[in-house]
Amino acid sequence: MRRREFLLGSGAAAGALGLGGFALASNPQELVIQPASFALRDQVTDGMVSLSPDAPPPVLYGNQGEVMRLPVRNTLPDYTAMHWHGLRIPNGMDGVPYLTQMPMGEGDQFDYEFIPPDAGTYWYHPHCMTMEQMAHGLTGVMVIAEAEDPGFDSEQVINLRDFRLDEVGAFLPAYTPRGAARAGTFGNVHTANWLQAPVYDHPAGGLVRLRVVNTDTTRIYKLNLDHAEARIIAWDGHPVDIDVPLPSVAEPLLLGPGQRVDFAVKMPEVEGKTVNLIAKLPGQPLRSMVGLQAVGASVARDMRELKPLAKNPVARPDLNKAELHEFVFGWTPEGGEPNNGFCGSLGYNFWSINRKPWPGDAAQDVGPLATLQMGKSYVLRLRNESPNLHPIHLHGLVFAPLKSNLRKLPPLMTDTMLLLKDEVVEIALVADNPGDWAFHCHVIEHQKTGLTGFVRVV
């Protein structure tokens, strides 16, 4: 079965991916944000949020360079707006309340329409009532297919995230003041595609594209693959054209909230053998988050048969002409309750950018952190003055890491930079997408307690 047939065949896609899948182009299917119930443990958990009453948010499929139409209707009593994380699309389609659109109330619909310029792995989530809706389930994966099939036998999408439940399966509070002021409030039920340690069947000896997405509100995963011939082929949606060491138990891959990684995996030749995606969680033994099980007679593929992924049409910055801007991420020197309008507030500020906390989604007369000129190259110096890690996400643009004071960084195009404790990282970009673009930490408690802002491209 060829890749595109595997993805879009009605039975094969749903069964093999472990998630429903929508192919969205000229004939869109309405996306309805609604209450949901699902057995995350032995008991059914009510009060979830999804695009289905009894299933995780589906994988949304599109094609590079082709129109995607995504009508989103809100049936919740809370306000919402949908953001398409990592996609370089027009500013009016970015889904950030007050910055690019008004929040959607109960019964409202917003018709998102855009042409994704880049292939790769992306995801979607609300940017209004962000903490509550994401913590209760509203995070889904987007796959934008390349124009040319790279030649995989099958594909597996993995949506990694925690849920915070009590002993009878009911939701605990999504956040705590103590968590928000530190590393965040962690969940205690660890899932892949809303399941605990699921196992998916793939052809023995076949080549699998494993797309792993961290949609958690807080957790930074330490990941590796066991017993696998594999390589990293894409990072945060963009092809990897250099040798990147495969993670190991000793040196796992750090995948922060918002980040994605694509592996090419050669399945075992023998039926029943399994490749596991392993996570090291604090204070726990190594845990298999998901297994890929070989089934059937071996198809005896070779990794050398895969075609290199075509580069996305991303402009490369001219470092000789780049202008420098500095951003300091740390605690806030002042308090005050942020004004978040209809989009929810945690009720306090702990964090800041350039020592000023975000005054709130609905605050008036708030200017950009920086104004960038269309088409010019820039270097952004990101300084973490806190002991906590921060996955810093920039909407609407992509950038390349240049250097760090703590480690060697591969120059992989990305939209989310994970800053380590006391780390200073320089990134470079071309300001080639006009508009006001949100710039924030993707630990949602940090975002909602001050560590957010926006940059303007004019």
Image (cartoon, rainbow, N blue to C red):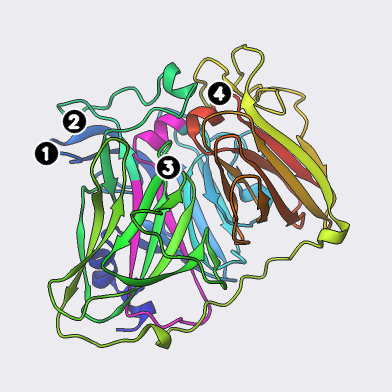
Residue 138 vertical placement versus 88 (above, below): above
Of the two numbered discs 3 and 2 in the rendering, the one whose residue sits closer to the viewer: 3
How crowded pointer 1 is (Cα within 10 Å; few <14, some 14-19, many 20+) is rated as few
Q: Nearer the viewer, residue 84 or 184?
A: 184
What residue is shown with label 1? 42
**Could you say whether the residue bearing mark 2 is in a helix, strand or loop?**
loop
Whole-Å distance between the Cαs marked 4 and 3? 19 Å
Badge 1 amino acid: Asp
Residues at discs 4 and 3 in contact (Cβ within 8 Å): no
What residue is shown with label 4? 449
**Could you say whether the residue bearing mark 3 is in a helix, strand or loop?**
loop
**Start and end of the magenta stretch?**
131-160
Name the residue rendered at 49%, 51% in the picture.
259
Can residue 129 be seen in this snapshot? no
Q: Position of residue 319 (x, y in %)?
A: 81, 59
Badge 2 amino acid: Gly
Can residue 254 be seen in this snapshot? yes
Of callouts 1 and 3, which one flags the residue occurring earlier in the amino acid sequence? 1
What residue is shown with label 3? 220
Q: How many marks?
A: 4
Residues at discs 1 and 2 in contact (Cβ within 8 Å): yes
296 left or right, relative to 327: left
- Rendering quarter of residue 316: bottom right
What residue is shown with label 2? 169
Whole-Å distance between the Cαs marked 1 and 2? 8 Å
